[in-house]
């Protein structure tokens, strides 16, 4: 009887492990993105998520590859409607990019000058993220819109931003099923690639007007110029 009982326990354990494996495989399968979702539907989900916000705070990691350079930077991005941005870098510490809705400002610690230029002249790789808190309509703003499910259950939406065709050959947006952007990759026509990974998104985060006012450090002069590479 004891041997029979032990055998039954072993069989029960085998079935439990088998069922656990089935559940794991089923879960892995469920993580795969729904291939029936269209590019138009995904774009609409992203639009809905961000158009309903007044402000947004998110951590970012930026990877730059091109022109013989390979650079990794990180920090916090703060957005506020309409069209205001603040990139506070922690690596390199103190670097700052501000868009106050009319002008952009760029400052790098150790420099005695900060650069500024009108928003209308801004052709910076961070500028495509402004649409996140505008009246976004990705289907109209991206030419050649297409969508590809990813292996980890997310989606990649891609296209070329209208008006930036000479500068950008592809803009890739990775989002989850709810439309939250997890990564954005910008491929320039000359082969330069900029990617931004986002985490810790905080919707309708505190975003006082003062956060988007550039105050030059002591001894730093503000001059007209071009955004840094």
Image: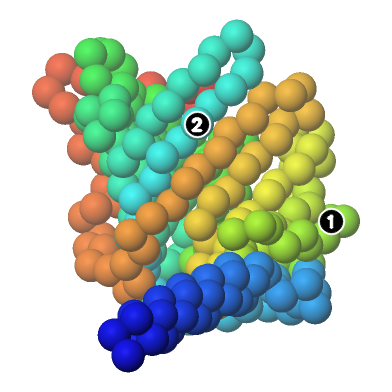
Residue most toward the right?
144
Task: Please name the residue shown 76% across and 22% down the image.
Answer: 190
Residue 25 in the image: state x and y as whole percent.
59, 70
Q: Is residue 108 above or below residue 135?
A: above
Q: Is residue 74 above or below residue 178?
A: above
- Residue 213 appears in view: yes
Residue 173 in the image: state x and y as whole percent.
64, 55
Q: Quadrant of residue 28?
A: bottom right
Q: Which mark is residue 63?
A: 2
SS for dot 1 = strand
Mark 2 crowd level (few <14, some 14–19, many ≥20, 10 Å Cα) = some
Residue most toward the front?
1
Left or right, residue 215 beside residue 189: left
Mark 1 crowd level (few <14, some 14–19, many ≥20, 10 Å Cα) = some
SS for dot 2 = strand
Q: Is residue 168 above or below residue 68?
A: below
Residue at numbered disc 1? 143
Q: CA distance from mark 2 to mark 1?
A: 24 Å
Left or right, residue 187 beside residue 60: right
Task: Please name the residue shown 56% across and 38% down the image.
Answer: 195
Left or right, residue 142 beside residue 97: right
Looking at the picture, tell me which residue is in the foreground, 32 or 74. 32
- The quadrant in which the N terminus is found is bottom left
Looking at the picture, tell me which residue is in the foreground, 214 or 176. 176
Task: Please name the residue shown 79% across and 38% down the image.
Answer: 169
Q: Quadrant of residue 216?
A: top left
Residue 23 in the image: state x and y as whole percent.
53, 78
Instruction: Give the foreground label among 2 and 1.
Output: 2
Q: Which mark is residue 22?
A: none
């Amino acid at each position: 009887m004891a041997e029979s009982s032990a055998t039954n326990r072993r069989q029960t354990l085998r079935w439990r492990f088998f069922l656990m494996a089935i559940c794991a495989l089923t879960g892995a399968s469920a993580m795969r993105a729904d291939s029936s979702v269209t590019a138009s539907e995904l774009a609409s989900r992203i639009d809905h998520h961000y158009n309903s916000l007044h402000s947004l705070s998110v951590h970012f990691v930026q990877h730059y590859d091109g022109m013989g350079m390979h650079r990794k930077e990180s920090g916090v991005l703060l957005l506020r409607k309409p069209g205001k941005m603040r990139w506070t870098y922690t690596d390199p510490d103190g670097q700052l990019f501000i868009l106050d809705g009319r002008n952009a400002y760029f400052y790098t610690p150790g420099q005695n000058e900060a650069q500024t230029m009108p928003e209308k002249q801004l052709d910076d790789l961070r500028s495509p993220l402004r649409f996140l808190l505008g009246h976004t309509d990705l289907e109209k703003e991206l030419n050649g819109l297409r969508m590809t499910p990813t292996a980890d259950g997310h989606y990649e939406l891609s296209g070329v931003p209208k008006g930036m065709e000479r500068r950008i050959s592809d803009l890739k947006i990775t989002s989850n099923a709810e439309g939250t952007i997890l990564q954005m990759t910008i491929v320039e026509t000359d082969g330069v690639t900029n990617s931004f990974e986002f985490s810790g998104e905080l919707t309708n985060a505190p975003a006082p007007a003062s956060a988007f006012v550039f105050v030059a450090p002591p001894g730093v002069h503000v001059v007209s110029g071009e955004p840094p590479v």
